[in-house]
Image (cartoon, rainbow, N blue to C red):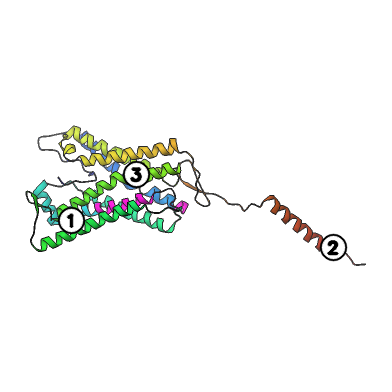
C-alpha cells in the first residue's frame, strides 16, 4: 500500500460489516481536527520568537533544512494523489481508494510556507555563529539529486515505451512509484530531523531560542493523532493500523522527541539567559527587551568629574574682576 506519511483528518472508512457508535465517530472526528489544528499552529511560536529576538541562535538550522525537504516531498505527494487523475487512477487500480484528504495537502503546503519563512529569518537575523552541518547538506543534496534523477529516468523510459513491472499494473518507472519514493523521504526526514536540535540543546546546556510552545503544540498534536489511530483500531478493527503502521510511527516519534525537549526545557537545562544582543528570556522561553546602559568604570567616572570641576573652576575665575 502506498504510504500516507501524515494521518488523515477523516477517520478510516469502516468495512461494510463493521459498525461503531455515533459517539465513537464523533470522538474520532474531534481528535482528528484537534491534532490538525495543533500541528498547524505549532509553526508560529518559533517564527514569532525569532522575530522578537532578531536572532535564530538556539534553533537548529539543520532541523529547518530537513523540514523544507520533508514538506516539499509531502506537498508533492498529497497534491499528486489529489489532483493528478492518472496517478489517482493508477493508485486505485493497485491499492483501492487512497486516504489522502484535502486537509493533508493544505497542511503540507502550510508547513512548507512557514518553513520557508523561518529559513528567510535565518538569512536576515543573527545566527549566533551557527552554520549548516556538512552531513545535513550532503544528505539533503543527495536526496534531491536522487529524486531528480529518478524523475528524469521515468521521463526517458516512458518516452521510449520501457516499463519495469513490480506487480499487478504497478511499474517501477511510473509516477506513482516516484511519489511513493517521496513519501519515504518524508518518513526518513521525520525520523531524523529532531536529532540536530536535541544535540544542540545538550551542547549548549540551554533551550533558549527553541520555542517551548512549538514543542507543546507538536506534542499535543502527536498525542491526539496516536489517540485517534488507537480509537479507530479499537472500534473499526486493527487491520488499518497494521496495514499502514507508518502513521502510528510518525505520531509516536513526534511524541517521543517532544517529551525529550520538554524534559530538557523544564528539568535539565533551566537557565533562561538569552545571549542574543539586548535580550533576555523569560521562564517560558519568550524574548523580552533588555534595557542597556553604558556604564563607566570608577577611573573613567573620576576623570570625568575632575575634568568638569576644572572646567567649572576656569569659568568662575574668568568671571572675577581683574585688579
- Which of the two discs, 3 and 1, labels the residue nearer the N terminus? 1
**Which residue lies at the image location 20% right of the left edge and 39% below the top edge?**
245
Q: Where is residue 302 shown, x and y percent of the image?
A: 73, 53
Q: Name the residue under label 1.
A: 83
Q: Are marks 2 and 3 in contact (CB under 8 Å)?
A: no
- Per the model, the C-alpha gap separating discs 3 and 1 is 34 Å
Q: Where is residue 262 shown, x and y percent of the image?
A: 39, 38
Secondary structure of the residue carrying numbered label 2:
helix
- Which of the two discs, 1 and 2, labels the residue nearer the N terminus? 1
**Which residue lies at the image location 11% right of the left edge and 60% below the top edge?**
158
Residue 105 covered by magenta stretch: no
Nearer to us: label 2 or label 3: 3
- Per the model, the C-alpha gap separating discs 2 and 3 is 74 Å
Residue found at the very far right of the displayed protein? 323
Secondary structure of the residue carrying numbered label 1:
helix
- Per the model, the C-alpha gap separating discs 1 and 2 is 91 Å
Q: In which quarter of the image is the C terminus?
A: bottom right
Q: Are marks 3 and 1 in contact (CB under 8 Å)?
A: no
The stretch of residues the image draws in magenta is 51-73
Label 1 environment density (alpha carbons within 10 Å; few <14, some 14–19, many ≥20): few
Nearer to us: label 3 or label 1: 3
Quarter where residue 228 is shown: top left
User: With respect to residue 262, does 151 lie above or below?
Assistant: below
**Which residue lies at the image location 10% right of the left edge and 38% below the top edge?**
16
- Which of the two discs, 2 and 3, labels the residue nearer the N terminus? 3
Q: Mark 3 points at which residue?
A: 195
Residue found at the very far bottom of the displayed protein? 322
Quarter where residue 22 is shown: top left
Secondary structure of the residue carrying numbered label 3:
helix
Q: Name the residue under label 2.
A: 317
Amino acid at each position: 500500500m502506498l504510504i500516507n506519511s501524515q494521518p488523515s483528518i477523516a477517520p478510516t472508512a469502516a468495512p461494510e460489516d463493521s459498525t461503531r457508535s455515533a459517539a465513537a465517530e464523533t470522538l474520532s472526528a474531534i481528535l482528528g481536527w484537534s491534532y490538525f489544528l495543533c500541528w498547524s499552529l505549532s509553526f508560529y511560536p518559533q517564527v514569532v520568537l525569532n522575530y522578537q529576538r532578531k536572532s535564530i541562535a538556539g534553533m537548529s538550522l539543520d532541523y529547518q533544512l530537513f523540514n523544507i525537504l520533508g514538506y516539499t516531498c509531502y506537498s508533492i505527494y498529497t497534491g499528486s494523489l489529489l489532483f493528478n487523475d492518472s496517478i489517482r487512477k493508477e493508485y486505485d487500480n493497485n491499492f483501492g481508494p487512497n486516504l489522502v484528504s484535502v486537509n493533508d495537502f493544505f497542511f503540507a503546503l502550510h508547513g512548507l510556507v512557514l518553513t520557508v519563512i523561518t529559513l528567510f529569518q535565518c538569512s536576515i537575523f543573527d545566527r549566533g555563529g551557527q552554520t549548516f552541518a556538512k552531513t545535513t547538506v550532503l544528505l539533503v543534496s543527495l536526496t534531491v539529486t536522487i529524486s531528480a534523477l529518478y524523475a528524469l529516468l521515468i521521463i526517458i523510459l516512458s518516452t521510449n515505451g520501457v516499463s519495469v513491472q513490480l506487480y499487478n499494473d504497478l511499474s517501477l518507472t511510473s509516477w506513482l512509484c516516484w511519489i511513493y519514493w517521496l513519501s519515504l523521504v518524508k518518513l526518513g526526514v521525520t525520523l531524523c530531523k529532531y536529532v540536530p536540535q536535541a544535540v544542540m540543546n545538550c551542547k549548549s546546556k540551554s533551550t533558549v531560542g527553541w520555542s517551548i510552545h512549538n514543542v507543546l503544540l507538536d506534542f499535543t498534536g502527536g498525542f491526539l493523532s496516536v489517540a485517534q489511530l488507537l480509537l479507530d483500531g479499537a472500534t473499526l478493527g486493527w487491520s488499518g493500523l497494521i496495514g499502514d503502521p507508518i502513521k502510528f510511527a510518525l505520531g509516536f516519534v513526534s511524541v517521543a522527541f517532544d517529551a525529550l525537549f520538554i524534559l530538557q526545557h523544564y528539568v535539565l537545562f533551566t537557565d533562561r539567559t538569552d545571549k542574543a544582543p539586548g535580550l533576555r528570556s523569560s521562564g517560558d522561553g519568550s524574548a523580552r527587551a533588555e534595557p542597556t546602559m553604558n556604564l563607566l568604570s570608577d577611573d573613567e567616572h573620576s576623570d570625568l568629574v575632575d575634568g568638569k570641576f576644572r572646567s567649572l573652576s576656569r569659568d568662575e575665575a574668568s568671571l572675577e574682576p581683574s585688579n
